[in-house]
Image (spheres, rainbow, N blue to C red):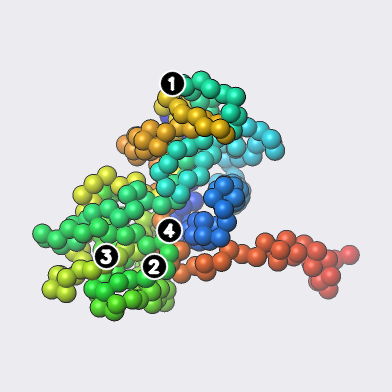
Amino acid sequence: MSPSEHRLGEAVRRMFARPEFMMPLAAAELQYRKNYYRLNAAALLEDLFFDALGSYINRVEPTLTFNRAQLGEKEWDYAIEDTKYSHKVIHTVSDVGIDWDATHTEPVWSAEHPIAIFLGSGDPRRPRMGLAPNLSRPVSFASTNARLRNKSRVGIGVWAGQQSLEIIYSSSHDEVSLGLREALPFKAAWPRIAEQIAKGSGANDVEIVFCERVAKSAPPFATELSLESKYLRPGLYLLPKQTLQDIQVKKNNRGRQIPKETVRSLLQQAVINGTFAPASLWFGVYASDVPPDLFITQSQEYESLFSPRRPG
């Protein structure tokens, strides 16, 4: 990994650790995916990430040089220092497009630049975790105001490494149908989350988890949940150029893609190599399902012309 790639990875980790950056990105992952068509949602999420990263660098780490590609550039999306990056956004582990030119038919592809992939949900969706001694169940990492079914457990956890989650709060619910937002209101969750952030955890270290249809006689969440299988967390996976040489690709009538299983392998390797910046999407539980009104945002510049506080 080049020094530039290391600086990008570290900058994104620090950005995701700050709630004022992580929370808007988490809300957008829910809002854009739910309200826009897939390619449109991906394009908007890419633009939002560029704006967030640029804002973070300008505000917090201004010695870093960050530049976006000119409109129409097909090979890369932004540059940090002297290294250009292609940025991809996927909601789940899936095929990743490398070009949108159906005339390219070569079955083997090598990258010209590193690729940064933002994965918007964990894989698998419901990994098995040890809830308590001799009790293992699929656990969901909350990112929306999901409806809980009867005999559910809800918890707040803090990551303690890649495979274990330290539970700092848990509750049990017997209702047949209960919204996660009602089971764990923001005013109840935030003081506990803020306390962990004040102790040094990042906003991206915190998770809200839940498990459904747990026997009434079962014990509450253990103080630590352990993953029983490999789990890819949401976040930014940085794939250095050298890992993207002589890749077998497939094609369709729109272009060429890296196959899903190859993508999975590359993401897993990024975790092993330490080129992964985890994100946490729990704020989606409390965010509105509806994205911000684009017209109101756009109209503010015009409206500001009539402000009595505007000079001239």
- Tell me the residue that label 1 is attached to: 246
Query: Label 4's element?
Result: loop
User: Which of the labelled discs sits on residue 281, or is there none?
Assistant: 4
For marks 3 and 1, the one nearer the N-term is: 3
Mark 4 vs mark 3: give the one in front.
3
Q: Amino acid at mark 1?
A: Asp
Query: Label 2's element?
Result: loop
Where residue 277 appears, x then y in whole percent? 42, 45
Query: Label 3's element?
Result: strand
Asked whether disc 4 touches disc 2, contact meaning CB atoms under 8 Å apart, the reply is: no
- The correct choice, above or below, for 245 with respect to 92 in the image is above
For marks 2 and 1, the one nearer the N-term is: 2
Instruction: Confirm whether residue 274 shows in the render.
Output: no
- The correct choice, above or below, for 44 with respect to 271 in the image is below
> In the rendered image, which quarter contains the C terminus?
bottom right
User: Which of the labelled discs sits on residue 211, or is there none?
Assistant: 3
For marks 1 and 4, the one nearer the N-term is: 1
Mark 1 vs mark 4: give the one in front.
1
Where residue 208 appears, x then y in whole percent? 34, 64
Q: Amino acid at mark 3?
A: Cys
Residue name at image x 74 percent, y 65 percent = 300
Where residue 202 appears, x then y in whole percent? 40, 56
Residue name at image x 19 percent, y 61 percent = 131
Seen from the viewer's position, the closer of residues 312 and 123 is 123
Residue 79 lies in quadrant: top right
Seen from the viewer's position, the closer of residues 115 and 109 is 109
Query: Label 1's element?
Result: loop
Residue name at image x 57 percent, y 23 percent = 104
